[in-house]
Image (tube, rainbow, N blue to C red):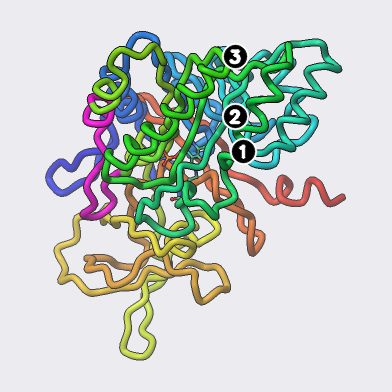
């Protein structure tokens, strides 16, 4: 994404041209930006370390394929995310499976496919895995996902590592699983994992969690487990407004420093920092209206397309796509959904007229994946731009798609 003479371009194409040709609302991604973001990690990790892109951030098959071709592994949180990765040509041996509620079917799928690691989040899950591996007579590599009890100070909905969150194992469960797994020939504990939350600016918080899991890994090793990996999760933040961006270089320098003399390989699970800045949502101004002394720009994208502002009061920059020589005004940008909370941006100073297009920036992560059909709205088309090339990587839904399962 770049601006040339006040106009927004995505790689070699003015965004306004794409909006005019393909319509709105529409998600557009830059392949080059994804490569750049991935490259920032790749140039910092050691030869044996592994970047497992967090599929939940954006699970489009084309994006998974692109990342797989760059050498990325994947962090999945459902059987269907695992199936997406396999369909996109991912290396099974680079897939880790997180999540607190893995079903029997999902565990079976993971064991059958011999993925790199199932990250265990409860004693009950360990028992399920043990039973399934025995039934299939297949060995399985697992991680103990622990809860390091570290608060990260981002939105409370995206903190995951505090003691009372639903994620990860407490020390009692770690000990219990460690004892039972030692006598189990099929379930190998090969890794210790954690993920303390998302949109983290301070790399030291993640390093603090590394200290916790490293100590646990050392204890497990003393107890007879062959621990190969430390999985420090994802979480580095990006700059939406004025936040400090997390830096993979600073993170990995700290990791190397701490692991000096130890044999562990590192697994990283970045999502937002890979795909967040690579995506925009283009929407059209339907109407401009006044209400109680306030100006609303009513847009054709709603909270069903981009839920982050309504759910987390998240801020996304809005850029005009036309170069209007008019005076600016202050607007709330409201969507078509019949909910008072369907406001995607508040108090923005913009030069806009009805029918103009604007772009919401940095929506590549947790944008399209969190969209819904609320109000029977059709999910937007998705485009991937590579240089001059445009690929429709998800077509726009139709009314027939919408009712297909209801006949
Ligand atoms: N690994 C695990 C186990 C996770 O739960 C997550 C994200 C990640 C990795 C990737 O974290 P990231 O690098 O993207 O921060 N919907 C929210 C974010 C939820 C994050 C959930 N877990 C948002 O829109 O801000």
**126 with respect to 311 (left or right):** right
The label shown at residue 75 is none
In the image, 386 versus 268, the foreground residue is 268
Tell which circle, 3 or 2, labels the residue nearer the N-terminal end: 3
Q: Which residue in the structure is indicated by mark 2?
A: 119
Which residue corresponds to the image point at 41% horizontal and 33% vertical from the top-left?
270
In the image, 347 versus 160, the foreground residue is 160
Is the C-beta separation of discs 3 and 2 under 8 Å? Answer: no
- C-alpha separation, residue under disc 3 versus residue under disc 2: 15 Å
Q: Which residue in the structure is indicated by mark 3?
A: 92
Image coordinates of residue 299 in percent, x first then y, are 43, 64
Label 2 sits on a secondary structure element that is: strand
Q: Which residue in the structure is indicated by mark 1?
A: 99
Q: Is residue 20 visible?
A: no
Image coordinates of residue 196 in percent, x first then y, are 44, 43
Label 3 sits on a secondary structure element that is: helix
For disc 2, does the CB lie below 8 Å from ligand 1?
yes
For disc 1, does the CB lie below 8 Å from ligand 1?
yes
Q: Residues within 10 Å of mark 1 (few under 14, many from 20)?
A: some
Q: What's drawn in magenta, residue-wise?
A: 238-253
Which residue corresponds to the image point at 55% horizontal and 52% vertical from the top-left?
165
Is the C-beta separation of discs 1 and 2 under 8 Å? Answer: yes
Image coordinates of residue 257 in percent, x first then y, are 24, 22
Q: Residues within 10 Å of mark 2 (few under 14, many from 20)?
A: many
**77 with respect to 280 (left or right):** right
Nearest-to-viewer mark from 3 and 2: 2
């Amino acid at each position: 994404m770049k601006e040339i003479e006040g106009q927004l371009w995505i790689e070699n194409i003015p965004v306004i041209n794409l909006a005019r040709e393909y319509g709105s609302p529409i998600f557009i991604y830059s392949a080059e930006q994804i490569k750049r973001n991935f490259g920032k990690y790749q140039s910092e990790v050691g030869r044996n370390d592994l970047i497992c892109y967090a599929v939940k951030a954006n699970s489009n098959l084309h994006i998974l394929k692109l990342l797989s071709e760059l050498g990325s592994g994947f962090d999945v949180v459902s059987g269907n995310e695992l199936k997406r990765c396999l369909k996109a040509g991912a290396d099974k041996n680079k897939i880790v499976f997180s999540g607190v509620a893995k079903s029997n079917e999902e565990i079976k799928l993971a064991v059958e496919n011999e993925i790199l690691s199932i990250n265990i989040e409860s004693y009950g899950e360990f028992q399920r895995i043990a039973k399934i591996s025995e039934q299939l007579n297949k060995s399985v590599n697992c991680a103990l996902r622990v809860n390091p009890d570290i608060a990260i100070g981002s939105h409370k909905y995206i903190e995951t590592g505090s003691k009372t969150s639903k994620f990860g194992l407490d020390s009692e469960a770690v000990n219990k699983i460690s004892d039972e797994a030692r006598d189990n020939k099929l379930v190998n504990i090969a890794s210790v994992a954690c993920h303390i939350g998302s949109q983290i600016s301070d790399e030291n918080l993640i390093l603090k969690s590394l200290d916790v899991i490293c100590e646990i890994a050392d204890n497990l090793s003393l107890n007879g487990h062959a621990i190969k990996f430390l999985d420090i999760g994802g979480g580095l933040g990006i700059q939406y407004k004025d936040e400090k961006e997390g830096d993979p270089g600073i993170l990995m320098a700290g990791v190397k420093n701490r692991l000096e003399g130890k044999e562990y390989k590192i697994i990283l699970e970045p999502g937002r920092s890979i795909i967040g800045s690579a995506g925009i949502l283009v929407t059209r101004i339907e109407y401009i209206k006044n209400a109680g002394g306030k100006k609303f720009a009513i847009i054709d994208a709603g909270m069903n397309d981009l839920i982050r502002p309504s759910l987390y009061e998240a801020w996304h920059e809005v850029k005009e796509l036309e170069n209007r020589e008019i005076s600016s005004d202050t607007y709330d940008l409201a969507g078509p959904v019949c909910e008072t909370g369907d406001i995607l941006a508040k108090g923005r100073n913009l030069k806009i007229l009805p029918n103009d297009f604007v772009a919401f920036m940095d929506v590549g992560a947790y944008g399209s994946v969190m969209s819904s059909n609320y109000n029977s709205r059709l999910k937007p088309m998705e485009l991937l731009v590579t240089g001059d090339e445009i690929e429709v990587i998800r077509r726009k839904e139709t009314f027939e798609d919408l009712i297909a399962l209801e006949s």
